[in-house]
Image (cartoon, rainbow, N blue to C red):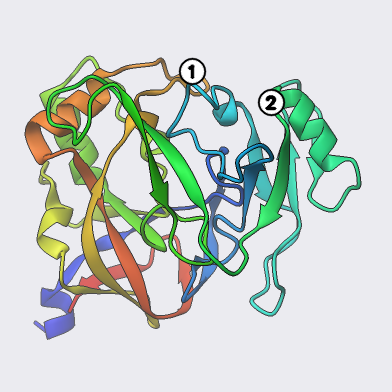
């Protein structure tokens, strides 16, 4: 057996991009990966006109409706383009595009708070996070500020991976909970070659994953979870037990973060190897 075959973990089962921070996103069959992650991912954020902070569902008391909006890229994103055009579906079913003149007024009215839609610029942006009153979290029942990585709208890292093995393990631990991919907002969902139910990604930290023929991702850290995983979205109910289960059994982590060592194209079904 070749080394590549020995090191094969599984394959890409789904790919996700979120063109506007904290809005619902879109599932992809294939995408280009650059040093900034999946092309077009978190290309935009809403910025609160009163304090300059990025809007995020991490503070649902301030931003209770972000999950009612969905953003999609209008045409295939191209690496040469500065930012892609996006279409945003509003809670009332109307749609707007990122290039229309009255966009900010429409979004501000829908959110009942004055906002502007912007692309990531030079400098760092702050955001806020609400910490529920729950054992295992760094803070309890308070709101803290945090700074996004320079010139991005990512919380921590450019790529987030999650295995179906982790979701299966969480379902075992808390059968009443609906542990679905959309609660965790990963970019790359991995189906392992084995049928294990475990927090498999924990063992990847510090290693490099090869996806398909070109892409190489350096796994940098576990992905610490927040109140966003507990929020209602679509037909998923609000459920604090989702976060509580991660806190009790995996130090509040679900999935892993990665940096891009080498870009390229990835597709659903691509094999994944550990190097």
Could you tell which of marks 1 and 2 lies nearer the N-terminus? Answer: 2
The structure residue drawn at horizontal position 57% and vertical position 38%, both measured from the top left corner, is 23
**Quarter placement of the C terminus:** bottom left
The structure residue drawn at horizontal position 31% and vertical position 65%, both measured from the top left corner, is 258
Residue 185 appears in the picture as rendered = yes
| Relative height, residue 38 to residue 181 (above, below) | below
Left or right for 250, reference 94: left
Tell me, yes or no, whether the two marked residues, 1 and 2, touch with CB atoms within 8 Å: no
- Closest to the observer: 119 or 174? 119
The structure residue drawn at horizontal position 84% and vertical position 34%, both measured from the top left corner, is 105
Left or right for 249, reference 113: left
The dot on residue 235 is 1
Residue 194 appears in the picture as rendered = no
Position in image of residue 268 (x %, y %): 44, 60
Q: CA distance from mark 1 to mark 2?
A: 21 Å
On the image, which quarter does residue 222 sit in?
bottom left
- Closest to the observer: 49 or 156? 49
Instruction: List the residue tagged with mark 2.
Output: 111
Position in image of residue 257 (x %, y %): 29, 59
Mark 1 or mark 2, which is nearer to you? Answer: 2
Position in image of residue 201 (x %, y %): 17, 55
């Amino acid at each position: 057996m070749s080394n590549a075959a020995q090191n094969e973990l599984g394959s890409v089962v789904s790919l996700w991009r979120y063109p506007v921070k904290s809005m619902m996103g879109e599932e992809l069959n294939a995408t280009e990966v650059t040093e900034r992650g999946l092309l077009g991912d978190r290309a935009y954020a809403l910025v609160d006109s009163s304090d300059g902070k990025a809007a995020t569902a991490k503070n649902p008391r301030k931003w209770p409706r972000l999950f009612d909006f969905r953003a999609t890229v209008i045409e295939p994103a191209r690496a040469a383009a500065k930012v892609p055009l996006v279409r945003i579906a509003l809670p009332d079913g109307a749609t707007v595009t990122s290039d229309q003149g009255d966009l900010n007024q429409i979004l501000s009215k829908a959110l009942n708070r004055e906002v502007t839609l912007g692309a990531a610029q030079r400098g760092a942006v702050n955001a806020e996070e609400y910490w529920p009153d729950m054992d295992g979290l760094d803070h309890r029942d308070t709101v803290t500020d945090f700074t996004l990585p320079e010139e991005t709208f990512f919380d921590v890292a450019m790529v987030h991976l999650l295995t179906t093995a982790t979701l299966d393990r969480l379902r075992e631990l808390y059968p009443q909970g609906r542990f679905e991919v959309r609660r965790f907002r990963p970019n790359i969902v991995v189906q392992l070659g084995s049928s294990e139910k475990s927090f498999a990604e924990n063992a990847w930290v510090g290693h490099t994953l090869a996806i398909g023929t070109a892409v190489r991702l350096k796994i940098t850290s576990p992905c610490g979870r927040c109140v966003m995983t507990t929020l209602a979205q679509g037909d998923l109910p609000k459920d604090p037990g989702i976060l509580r289960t991660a806190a009790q059994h995996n130090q509040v982590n679900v999935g892993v973060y990665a940096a891009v060592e080498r870009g390229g194209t990835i597709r659903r079904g691509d094999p994944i190897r550990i190097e």
